[in-house]
Amino acid sequence: MEKRSIIIDTDPGQDDAVAILLALASPDEIDVLGITCVAGNVPLELTAKNARMVCELAGRSDIAVYAGCDRPLGRDLVTAEHVHGKTGLDGPKLPDPGMPLQDLHAVDYIIDTLRAASKGSVTLCPLGPLTNIATALLRAPDIADHVREIVLMGGAYFEVGNITPAAEFNIYVDPQAADIVFKSGIPIVVMPLDVTHKALVTAPRNQAFRALNTPVGVAVAQMTEFFERFDKEKYGSAGAPLHDPCVTAWLIRPDIFSGRHINVEIETQSELTLGMTVADWWGVTDRPANALFIGDLDADAFFALLTERLGRL
């Protein structure tokens, strides 16, 4: 399998942390060029701190981490401490990071890295609101040709919304940014709630993380134990859905996912449905397909992959 060069754009977040760990545990398939942080689950200061804590947990203090946009393009920031806790990484007790935050702004790093790369060679992996990615595309439209594809976690169709009745959190936080990205012409793979809600950390799966008996395994078990309280109460589910690791897993094992190439538009005007991903799953419009919208995964294969890889760290 061809090794992918990626930039992870993230707002950690327990599930973001697991996605980063999976990428760092898979060097044969994934070359993490850098990690860019955005405000989302918690404010930017915390997401930039959390990303570095996760890198150090993985023993990868060599990874460059950049802080980016601290607010959406055109509205006030909405955060999700009610899900992730006041730090964004509530659960394990991780030490404050010793590795530095890079001086360069994340958007400048994205632009510089893409311009220096061959055309169609870098995959962008946004795990949070799309503010950094959209800002880079607005500021430097030429970089689009250098992106192989964008593989993102965001949106929903059959599962509708998790922050409003119609909208998924990442898209809702910055719908204007999402609209720019989905209209960019860059190939897009979407991991919506429709698939991520099937990646449930049940008690046996969480025990498998803990049974790794490593700092990473125990920390991931503690993260998901904290994270799951919200989803168990809200959905009556058996555990926490690991949303963002679906992005990383797709890079490694796309064969365990299935979806459709469809048109996806972002609602940016309506007060009622702001941030909705209007996904033409049934092909009822003549709008051209602009995304591979994932709808299902082999959950057992997903967790087998995740547990095996986390065991390498």
Image (cartoon, rainbow, N blue to C red):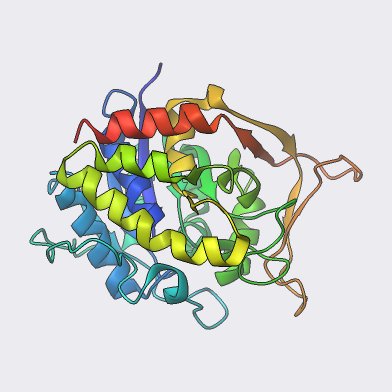
- Identify the image quadrant of the C terminus: top left
Residue 302 in the figure: left or right of residue 293 = left
Q: Quadrant of residue 272 in the image?
A: bottom right
Task: Please determine whether, in this image, residue 290 is positioned above or below residue 250.
Answer: below
Residue 36 picture quarter:
bottom left
Query: x%, y% of residue 291?
Result: 67, 41
Q: Position of residue 40 (x, y in %)?
A: 44, 69
| Residue with the most extreme top position | 1
Q: Position of residue 74 (x, y in %)?
A: 57, 78
User: Which of the 4 image quadrants contains residue 96?
Assistant: bottom left
In the image as oriented, which residue stretches furthest toward the bottom? Answer: 76
The residue located at (75%, 51%) in the rendering is 158
28 vs 230, nearest the viewer: 230
Provide residue 38's location: percent of width, then percent of height.
Answer: 39, 65
* Residue situated furthest left in the rendering: 98
Q: Which of 121 and 57 lies nearest the eye of the viewer?
A: 57
| Residue 203 in view, yes or no | yes
**Circle count:** 0
Is residue 131 rendered to the left or right of residue 306?
right
For the N terminus, give its image quadrant: top left
**Relative to 246, is 76 above or below?**
below
Viewer-proximal residue among 184 and 174? 174
Residue drawn at x 46%, y 75% is 82
Residue 13 visible to an observer of this rendering? no
Q: In the rendered view, does 123 fall on the left or right side of 185?
A: left
